[in-house]
Image (cartoon, rainbow, N blue to C red):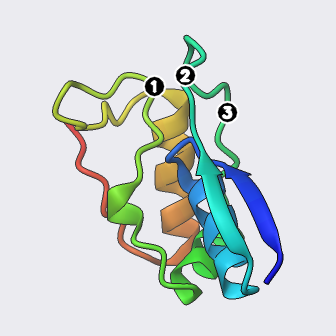
Amino acid sequence: MSKTVVLLSGGLDSTTTLAIAKSQKFDCYALSFDYGQKQRSELVSAQIIKQGLSLGVDYSQTISCYQANKKGVACGECDACVLRQNGFTQAGVVDPTKYQ
């Protein structure tokens, strides 16, 4: 089994990337670190969301918000939240994110 390292931010892109690697039978090692800032952008699209769902990704366990509160509830207004909401709408899937 081939090994791979996946940089995991906890957002849509990296979570879906991890699911793709696992579906391709890679032995995955997730690497995450605090580099002192939030993700600059989250590539949110219906295609990424649909592919992740087909791989069994539970997007209720991810967050893209730049301003989530301490309980992990997203603001619903920052760029990342708007991109995420649009991606789920375009995919025709209910966004499982908890918004303020």
Q: State which tag comes first along the sequence, 1 or 3.
A: 3
Q: Quadrant of the N terminus?
A: bottom right
Q: Residue 86 occupies which quadrant of the picture?
A: bottom right
Q: Residue 45 occupies which quadrant of the picture?
A: bottom right
The secondary element bearing badge 2 is classed as loop
For residue 40, above or below residue 8: above
The residue type indicated by label 1 comes to: Tyr
Identify which residue is drawn at 34% across, 36% down: 76
- The residue under label 1 is 66
Residue 64, how many percent across, how many down?
48, 41
* Inter-mark Cα distance, 1 to 2: 6 Å
- The residue under label 2 is 38
Depth check: give the residue in front, 41 or 22: 22
- The residue under label 3 is 41
Q: Label for residue 18?
A: none
Q: Residues within 10 Å of mark 3 (few under 14, many from 20)?
A: few
Q: Residue 94 occupies which quadrant of the picture?
A: bottom left
Q: Please state if 18 lies on the left or on the right of 85 as rendered.
A: right
Q: State which tag comes first along the sequence, 1 or 2.
A: 2
The residue type indicated by label 2 comes to: Lys
The residue type indicated by label 3 comes to: Ser
For residue 5, above or below residue 3: above
Q: In the rendered structure, are the residues bearing label 1 and label 2 in contact, judged by CB atoms less than 8 Å apart?
A: yes
**Residue at the front extreme, as displayed:** 1
